[in-house]
Protein backbone atom coordinates (compact mmCIF):
# COMPACT_ATOMS: atom_id res chain seq x y z
CA UNK A 1 0.00 0.00 0.00
CA UNK A 2 1.04 3.59 -0.55
CA UNK A 3 2.65 5.33 2.37
CA UNK A 4 1.25 8.46 3.91
CA UNK A 5 2.93 11.43 5.56
CA UNK A 6 1.25 13.41 8.32
CA UNK A 7 2.45 16.08 10.73
CA UNK A 8 3.38 14.65 14.10
CA UNK A 9 1.14 16.97 16.06
CA UNK A 10 -1.24 19.90 15.73
CA UNK A 11 -3.15 22.21 18.04
CA UNK A 12 -6.56 23.71 17.42
CA UNK A 13 -8.76 26.00 19.48
CA UNK A 14 -12.08 24.64 20.63
CA UNK A 15 -14.91 25.67 18.33
CA UNK A 16 -12.64 26.29 15.38
CA UNK A 17 -12.20 24.09 12.34
CA UNK A 18 -9.38 21.57 12.57
CA UNK A 19 -7.67 20.88 9.25
CA UNK A 20 -5.46 17.81 9.20
CA UNK A 21 -3.28 17.32 6.11
CA UNK A 22 -2.03 14.08 4.64
CA UNK A 23 0.35 13.45 1.77
CA UNK A 24 0.03 10.25 -0.25
CA UNK A 25 2.00 11.05 -3.37
CA UNK A 26 2.41 7.41 -4.47
CA UNK A 27 -1.27 6.54 -4.31
CA UNK A 28 -2.51 4.42 -7.19
CA UNK A 29 -5.76 4.68 -9.08
CA UNK A 30 -7.78 2.10 -7.17
CA UNK A 31 -6.63 3.04 -3.68
CA UNK A 32 -8.93 4.77 -1.22
CA UNK A 33 -8.00 7.33 1.42
CA UNK A 34 -9.28 6.43 4.88
CA UNK A 35 -9.25 8.42 8.07
CA UNK A 36 -9.48 6.92 11.53
CA UNK A 37 -8.88 8.36 14.93
CA UNK A 38 -7.84 6.84 18.21
CA UNK A 39 -8.63 8.40 21.53
CA UNK A 40 -6.18 7.42 24.24
CA UNK A 41 -6.44 3.76 25.31
CA UNK A 42 -9.41 3.06 23.04
CA UNK A 43 -9.84 1.23 19.76
CA UNK A 44 -9.70 3.24 16.53
CA UNK A 45 -12.83 4.91 15.26
CA UNK A 46 -13.68 5.20 11.57
CA UNK A 47 -14.21 8.77 10.42
CA UNK A 48 -14.52 8.93 6.65
CA UNK A 49 -13.08 7.61 3.41
CA UNK A 50 -12.98 8.64 -0.24
CA UNK A 51 -11.59 7.76 -3.64
CA UNK A 52 -11.40 11.00 -5.60
CA UNK A 53 -14.46 13.08 -4.81
CA UNK A 54 -14.77 15.17 -1.68
CA UNK A 55 -16.83 13.51 1.00
CA UNK A 56 -18.80 14.76 3.99
CA UNK A 57 -20.55 13.00 6.83
CA UNK A 58 -21.76 13.89 10.28
CA UNK A 59 -18.26 13.78 11.70
CA UNK A 60 -16.04 15.42 9.13
CA UNK A 61 -15.28 16.42 5.57
CA UNK A 62 -12.60 14.93 3.38
CA UNK A 63 -11.03 17.05 0.68
CA UNK A 64 -8.92 15.16 -1.87
CA UNK A 65 -6.80 17.10 -4.35
CA UNK A 66 -7.46 16.61 -8.01
CA UNK A 67 -4.18 14.71 -8.50
CA UNK A 68 -5.05 12.64 -5.42
CA UNK A 69 -1.59 13.10 -3.97
CA UNK A 70 -2.83 14.73 -0.81
CA UNK A 71 -5.96 15.16 1.25
CA UNK A 72 -7.27 17.15 4.18
CA UNK A 73 -9.58 16.03 6.92
CA UNK A 74 -11.72 18.84 8.28
CA UNK A 75 -13.45 18.74 11.64
CA UNK A 76 -15.71 21.76 11.27
CA UNK A 77 -16.22 22.68 14.93
CA UNK A 78 -13.63 20.97 17.08
CA UNK A 79 -14.49 20.07 20.66
CA UNK A 80 -12.28 18.87 23.48
CA UNK A 81 -13.49 15.32 22.80
CA UNK A 82 -11.87 15.47 19.37
CA UNK A 83 -8.43 15.31 20.99
CA UNK A 84 -6.97 12.10 19.56
CA UNK A 85 -4.43 10.65 17.18
CA UNK A 86 -5.71 10.88 13.62
CA UNK A 87 -4.55 8.36 11.06
CA UNK A 88 -4.62 8.80 7.31
CA UNK A 89 -4.41 5.44 5.55
CA UNK A 90 -4.35 4.49 1.91
CA UNK A 91 -5.93 1.13 1.20
CA UNK A 92 -6.39 -0.94 -1.90
CA UNK A 93 -9.90 -1.04 -3.23
CA UNK A 94 -10.06 -4.54 -4.56
CA UNK A 95 -9.06 -7.52 -2.48
CA UNK A 96 -6.59 -6.10 -0.01
CA UNK A 97 -8.56 -4.89 2.99
CA UNK A 98 -5.64 -4.59 5.35
CA UNK A 99 -4.96 -1.22 6.93
CA UNK A 100 -1.32 -0.25 7.31
CA UNK A 101 -1.01 2.33 10.09
CA UNK A 102 1.51 5.16 10.12
CA UNK A 103 2.34 7.35 13.08
CA UNK A 104 -0.68 9.63 12.65
CA UNK A 105 -1.19 13.20 13.85
CA UNK A 106 -1.73 13.95 17.50
CA UNK A 107 -4.46 16.60 17.50
CA UNK A 108 -4.86 18.56 20.70
CA UNK A 109 -7.95 20.73 21.05
CA UNK A 110 -7.37 23.57 23.46
CA UNK A 111 -10.09 25.42 25.39
CA UNK B 1 -23.13 1.78 13.73
CA UNK B 2 -21.78 -1.72 13.95
CA UNK B 3 -20.36 -2.74 17.31
CA UNK B 4 -17.37 -4.92 18.07
CA UNK B 5 -16.68 -6.05 21.60
CA UNK B 6 -13.57 -7.48 23.18
CA UNK B 7 -13.26 -9.47 26.34
CA UNK B 8 -11.59 -9.00 28.68
CA UNK B 9 -10.90 -5.28 28.51
CA UNK B 10 -7.81 -5.78 30.62
CA UNK B 11 -5.95 -8.75 32.05
CA UNK B 12 -2.95 -9.28 34.28
CA UNK B 13 -1.28 -12.66 34.24
CA UNK B 14 1.87 -14.38 35.42
CA UNK B 15 4.71 -15.15 33.06
CA UNK B 16 4.30 -18.56 31.43
CA UNK B 17 0.51 -18.63 31.48
CA UNK B 18 -1.81 -18.41 28.49
CA UNK B 19 -4.39 -15.72 27.94
CA UNK B 20 -7.38 -15.82 25.60
CA UNK B 21 -8.90 -12.65 24.17
CA UNK B 22 -12.30 -12.73 22.48
CA UNK B 23 -13.45 -10.46 19.69
CA UNK B 24 -17.15 -10.42 18.83
CA UNK B 25 -19.15 -8.60 16.20
CA UNK B 26 -22.40 -7.91 18.01
CA UNK B 27 -24.83 -6.91 15.28
CA UNK B 28 -23.24 -8.07 12.06
CA UNK B 29 -21.41 -11.02 10.60
CA UNK B 30 -17.75 -10.80 9.74
CA UNK B 31 -15.97 -13.18 7.42
CA UNK B 32 -12.69 -11.44 8.16
CA UNK B 33 -11.30 -10.14 11.42
CA UNK B 34 -7.94 -8.55 12.05
CA UNK B 35 -5.75 -8.61 15.13
CA UNK B 36 -3.45 -5.74 15.99
CA UNK B 37 -0.93 -5.02 18.70
CA UNK B 38 -0.04 -1.57 19.93
CA UNK B 39 2.85 -0.72 22.22
CA UNK B 40 2.83 2.54 24.23
CA UNK B 41 3.15 5.65 22.09
CA UNK B 42 3.34 3.58 18.92
CA UNK B 43 0.95 2.94 16.10
CA UNK B 44 -1.11 -0.18 15.49
CA UNK B 45 0.76 -3.12 14.07
CA UNK B 46 -1.15 -5.78 12.19
CA UNK B 47 -0.47 -9.22 13.62
CA UNK B 48 -2.75 -11.46 11.60
CA UNK B 49 -5.78 -11.70 9.39
CA UNK B 50 -8.40 -14.16 10.52
CA UNK B 51 -10.90 -15.69 8.11
CA UNK B 52 -13.88 -17.67 9.30
CA UNK B 53 -13.39 -21.37 8.82
CA UNK B 54 -9.79 -21.20 7.68
CA UNK B 55 -6.34 -20.70 9.10
CA UNK B 56 -5.21 -17.22 9.99
CA UNK B 57 -2.61 -15.42 7.94
CA UNK B 58 0.19 -14.04 10.08
CA UNK B 59 2.35 -11.04 9.33
CA UNK B 60 6.07 -11.45 9.07
CA UNK B 61 7.72 -11.72 12.45
CA UNK B 62 4.58 -12.81 14.31
CA UNK B 63 4.90 -16.31 15.76
CA UNK B 64 1.83 -18.32 14.85
CA UNK B 65 2.51 -20.91 17.55
CA UNK B 66 2.61 -18.21 20.19
CA UNK B 67 -0.39 -16.20 19.04
CA UNK B 68 -3.10 -18.74 18.29
CA UNK B 69 -6.07 -17.42 16.37
CA UNK B 70 -9.39 -19.18 16.00
CA UNK B 71 -12.25 -17.80 13.93
CA UNK B 72 -14.87 -20.46 14.39
CA UNK B 73 -17.97 -18.42 13.57
CA UNK B 74 -18.96 -15.31 11.67
CA UNK B 75 -19.21 -13.34 14.90
CA UNK B 76 -16.31 -14.57 17.00
CA UNK B 77 -12.55 -14.65 16.71
CA UNK B 78 -10.20 -15.47 19.56
CA UNK B 79 -6.53 -14.69 20.11
CA UNK B 80 -4.65 -16.84 22.60
CA UNK B 81 -1.28 -15.62 23.79
CA UNK B 82 0.49 -18.81 24.83
CA UNK B 83 3.24 -18.89 27.45
CA UNK B 84 3.04 -15.16 27.86
CA UNK B 85 6.13 -13.19 28.83
CA UNK B 86 6.52 -9.58 29.96
CA UNK B 87 7.50 -8.50 26.45
CA UNK B 88 4.03 -9.62 25.30
CA UNK B 89 2.48 -6.90 27.46
CA UNK B 90 0.65 -4.66 25.04
CA UNK B 91 -2.70 -3.31 23.88
CA UNK B 92 -4.38 -5.87 21.63
CA UNK B 93 -7.08 -4.63 19.27
CA UNK B 94 -9.32 -6.51 16.89
CA UNK B 95 -11.36 -5.29 13.98
CA UNK B 96 -14.09 -6.89 11.92
CA UNK B 97 -14.98 -6.54 8.28
CA UNK B 98 -18.70 -7.00 7.62
CA UNK B 99 -19.69 -9.65 5.12
CA UNK B 100 -20.21 -8.15 1.65
CA UNK B 101 -19.12 -4.70 2.82
CA UNK B 102 -15.47 -4.10 2.22
CA UNK B 103 -15.22 -0.40 2.89
CA UNK B 104 -15.12 -0.11 6.62
CA UNK B 105 -13.52 -2.05 9.43
CA UNK B 106 -15.11 -1.77 12.84
CA UNK B 107 -12.77 -1.86 15.80
CA UNK B 108 -13.09 -3.30 19.24
CA UNK B 109 -12.21 -1.26 22.33
CA UNK B 110 -8.97 -3.14 22.86
CA UNK B 111 -7.58 -5.43 25.56
CA UNK B 112 -4.75 -4.32 27.81
CA UNK B 113 -2.50 -7.29 28.61
CA UNK B 114 0.06 -7.02 31.39
CA UNK B 115 2.35 -9.98 31.98
CA UNK B 116 4.17 -9.97 35.29
Image (cartoon, coloured by chain):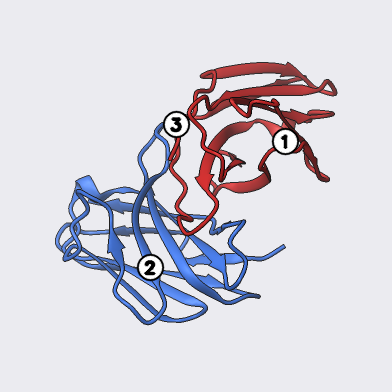
Chain colours: A red, B blue
> The residue tagged with tag 3: helix, strand or loop?
loop
Between B11 and A66, the one nearer to me in the picture? A66
The answer to whether B52 appears left or right of A43 in the picture is: left
- Contact flag, marks 1 and 3 (Cβ < 8 Å): no
> The residue tagged with tag 1: helix, strand or loop?
helix
Q: Report the residue at 22% width, 53% height from top.
A: B62
Residue A34, image quadrant? top right
Judging by the rendered image, the residue that carries numbered circle 2 is B50
* Distance from Cα at disc 3 to Cα at disc 2: 24 Å
Q: Is residue A61 above or below residue B11?
A: above
Q: Is residue B76 above or below residue A63?
A: below
> The residue tagged with tag 2: helix, strand or loop?
strand
Q: Report the residue at 22% width, 67% height from top.
A: B18
Using the image, name the chain to which the residue with label 1 belongs.
A
Between B63 and B110, the one nearer to me in the picture? B63
The answer to whether A94 appears left or right of A82 in the picture is: left
* Distance from Cα at disc 1 to Cα at disc 2: 32 Å
Q: Earlier in the sequence, mark 1 or mark 3?
A: 3
Give the number of the mark in front: 1 or 2.
2
Return the mark for residue A3: 3
Instruction: Quarter of the image for the C terminus of chain A: give it.
Output: top right
Return the mark for residue A81: 1
Using the image, name the chain to which the residue with label 3 belongs.
A
Are tags 3 and 2 found on a single chain? no
Q: Could you say where residue B54 lies in the image, as x and y percent from the top left?
A: 33, 78
Q: Could you say where residue B99 lies in the image, as x and y percent from the top left?
A: 58, 73
Give the number of the mark in front: 3 or 2.
3
Judge whether residue A82 can be spotted in this image: yes
Return the mark for residue A50: none
Judge whether residue A41 can be spotted in this image: no
Give the number of the mark in front: 1 or 3.
3
- Contact flag, marks 1 and 2 (Cβ < 8 Å): no
Amino acid sequence: DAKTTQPTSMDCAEGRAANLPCNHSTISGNEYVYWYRQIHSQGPQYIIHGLKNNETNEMASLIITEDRKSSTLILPHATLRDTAVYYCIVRGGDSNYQLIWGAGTKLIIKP
Amino acid sequence: GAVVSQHPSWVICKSGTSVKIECRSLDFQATTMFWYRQFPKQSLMLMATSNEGSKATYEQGVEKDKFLINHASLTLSTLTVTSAHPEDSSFYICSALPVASYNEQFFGPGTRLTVL
